[in-house]
Image (spheres, helix red, strand yellow):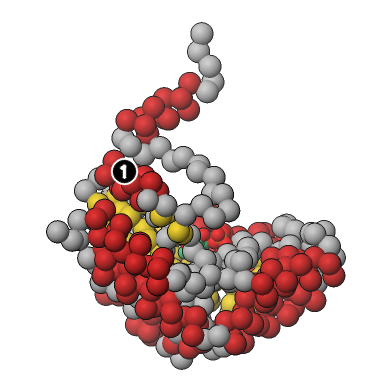
Amino acid sequence: MTSPLDWIREAAATREVAGLTRRLATTKSGDGLDLAGNDYLGLRTHPAVIAGAVAATETYGTGAGASRLVTGTLDVHDELEAALADLTGAPSALVLSSGYAANLAALTTLADAGTLVVSDEHAHASLIDGCRLARAAVSVSRHNDVEHVAELLGRREVPRAVVVAESIYSVLGDAAPVEDLIALTAEAGAILVIDEAHALGVVGPRGGGLVAAAGQSGAEHVIVTGTLSKSFAAQGGTVMASPVVREHLVNTARPFVYDTGLAPAAAGAALAALEVLRDHPELTVRLHSNAARLAAACGVDAPAGGVMSVEMPGPFEAVEAVERARAHGIRIGCFRPPSTPDGTSRLRLTAHADHTEHDLDRACEVLAELTGSRG
Ligand SMILES: Cc1ncc(COP(=O)(O)O)c(C=O)c1O
């Protein structure tokens, strides 16, 4: 007797044979040294950030209770949006319930069937899904290849164009040619949607990201998206742009209009994290020096931000390295197809500002052994 779920079992068996099964591993408190997560500044357990979450919960309750357009816009959202705009120099900011939702909101409202989207081949899944939902024609550009972006834009036969990139790439950890993309899109009359999820709090002036570093935060055609779940140690996402774009999103972005407002605890925590970052710029300096040490141990170049990518021979080797690191009390991540568009398998490691000298000594020893960069 066949079951309507048979095809799902077959798909699972195919994944298993190819070494591509994803498995949930529950992280326990104090469960090894974290070189896999995205808490770049180490603020998730910072007393001031926890106090920010608690204070917002005590003031507003545990949930926003409704869409931002109904009763779900709280003072803490307004304060958080002002603080994000202050950090990046963006003219205005809007917060949503995740970075994923922020990318869906930006792309579904800025692109449509009359838009050509040119998207970098390493763009995050949330950007890809935003393009799909926008029903736009999508051309995929070679990674960080501005000439290819220009060539694809030149072939456009529809009225509008949007270029999609990340400023620091989530898997490869490299930086986009941000200034060139901003100049190219300005010249081509296109919008640039640039995801700074792995750049905010990590690079640029005061951790304001690479658009701020390029002095282009006020450029009207540049729309920055980001998450509150990485450097800002909370949950939620943001779109930062000119007030006209913010207003457009408030009125038309389905992931904003039809979604309950960001939970007060997340907003309060992110706001407090932004304050800690403002008062402690040395956190980003420490993050970079920790990243340089870990990169050297793995035999790769120091990364642009906090993400290091180490190519492995295949998916089984990548998973084995993750398991061996875990046995040493060290958490590292790996990416395998289909998460890697070029079909490679990679270890993904992240540096954190709060790792101690002792943590780093221990991690470097294990990483050098795992990646074969020593002896
Ligand atoms: C580049 C990028 N954009 C967006 C997201 C989604 O953000 P969130 O986790 O807040 O939904 C992530 C990762 O989580 C990411 O790496």
Question: For the view shown, which residue lies furthest in the left direction?
Answer: 375
Question: For the view shown, which residue lies furthest in the top direction?
Answer: 1
Q: What residue do we see at 53% from left, 70% from top?
A: 42
Can residue 273 be seen in the rendering of this structure?
Answer: yes
Question: For the view shown, which residue lies furthest in the bottom direction?
Answer: 215
Total labels drawn: 1
Quarter of image, res 190: bottom left
Quarter of image, res 320: top left
Q: Nearer the viewer, residue 258 or 158?
A: 258
Residue 93 image offset from top left, x and y in percent? 64, 78
> Where does label 1 land, which residue?
320
Q: What residue do we see at 33% from left, 37% from top?
A: 19
Residue 111 image offset from top left, x and y in percent? 53, 65
What element does badge 1 sit on?
A: helix
Indicate whether 199 appears above or below 309: below
Q: What residue do we see at 35% from left, 62% from top?
A: 362
